[in-house]
Image: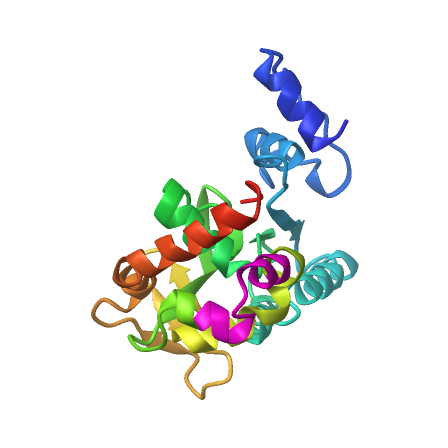
Amino acid sequence: MTPEKLTAEQQKGWMPVAVYRRGTFAAASYVADDELIAAARGFEGLNRVVLAVSATPALRSSWDEMLLRAQLVLEGNDAWQTGLVSWLTEREGQAALDHHVRVYNMFDLIRALVGIVVHGDERWVDTVVAVAGDVNDPQCALAGVIVWDGDGMDVEEASRSVVSQDDTDFIFMWITGADVFQRELMAALGLRYALIERVAGQRPTWYLPEAADKRREITGDELSSFERFVSTRYESIHRVAGIITANSMGMI
C-alpha cells in the first residue's frame, strides 16, 4: 500500500488497529506505533522521513550500518554529518544503550520558509535528532538547528542570486534541484547548520565536533536566531511564496 493510499483510507474513516513489527523495530520502545504509522502515511502525499534507524554499540554490525546510513543521508551537510558521527562515536564507549537516529526533510529551505510563514507549518524544516536511551526519557540527545548570524540578503534577492532572475526558471530550479543550491542560498541568507546537545539534568550546550572543547555554553538568544530570521524576513518570504503560487500550479 502506498503512502497516498494509506492516507486516503484513513480519511475515509479506516484506522490501523495493530502494528506488527519485525527486525530492527521489533521492540516498541524504538519507535512508537503512531510514529511508524505516520512514516508509512507520509504528509500531504510526501514522506518527510529520510531516515529512522536504531542500534546499540553492543551490536557492532548494526551500529556500523547506522553510522553509514546517517552519513549517506546527510551528505552535503558537513556540519550535521561530521557532528552526528563524532557524537555517536563518543557514545560507543558509554553504556550499551539503544540509540535512535531520525532525519527529516533535508535541503529544501524555500519550502520550509514558505511553510512556516504562509501555512504556520514547521514540518519542512531540516531536522536531525539522535537519542540515547528511552525515546521518551533519554539519557542524552543531539539535535540539529539552523542559526542566523543576523546579516545576509533579503530572501527574494538571495533566491534570485543563487537560482535565476526569471520566475519560470526559478520555479523549475527550485522544484527539480532544491538540494543543489541549498548551501549557496543559506550562505547568502547568513544561515548555517549547528548542533546542540541535551543531557538529562543539565543545561543544553552547543556541540562543536571540530573544536578543542566540543561543548560550549549557549548564551543569550542564540537558539532563537532562526525564529528571528523568519520574523525579520517575513515580508520577503511572502513575496517568494507569491512567485511560487503564481508559477508552480500549487506544487507547494
Task: Describe residue 151's horizontal placement relative to residue 162 as left or right.
Answer: left
Q: Coloring scheme of the render?
A: rainbow
Q: Position of residue 115 (x, y in %)?
A: 43, 47
- 43 or 32, nearer to the observer: 43
- 114 or 54, nearer to the observer: 114
Q: Quadrant of residue 23?
A: top right
Q: Position of residue 143 (x, y in %)?
A: 46, 60
Q: Quadrant of residue 154?
A: bottom left
Residue 214 visible: yes
Is 161 colored magenta in this rendering? yes
Residue occupying the far bottom of the picture: 212
Residue 171 vs 152, above or below: the answer is above
Residue 120 vs 199, above or below: the answer is above
Task: Describe residue 165's horizontal placement relative to residue 226 as left or right.
Answer: right
Task: Describe residue 205's horizontal placement relative to residue 208 as left or right.
Answer: left
Is 165 colored magenta in this rendering? yes
Residue 78 vs 66, above or below: the answer is below
Q: Position of residue 109 (x, y in %)?
A: 49, 60
Q: Which residues are magenta?
A: 158-173
> Chief secondary structure of the magenta span?
helix
Residue in view at x 59 percent, y 33 percent: 38
- 227 or 129, nearer to the observer: 227
Residue in view at x 72 percent, y 60 percent: 69
Q: Position of residue 185 (x, y in %)?
A: 49, 72
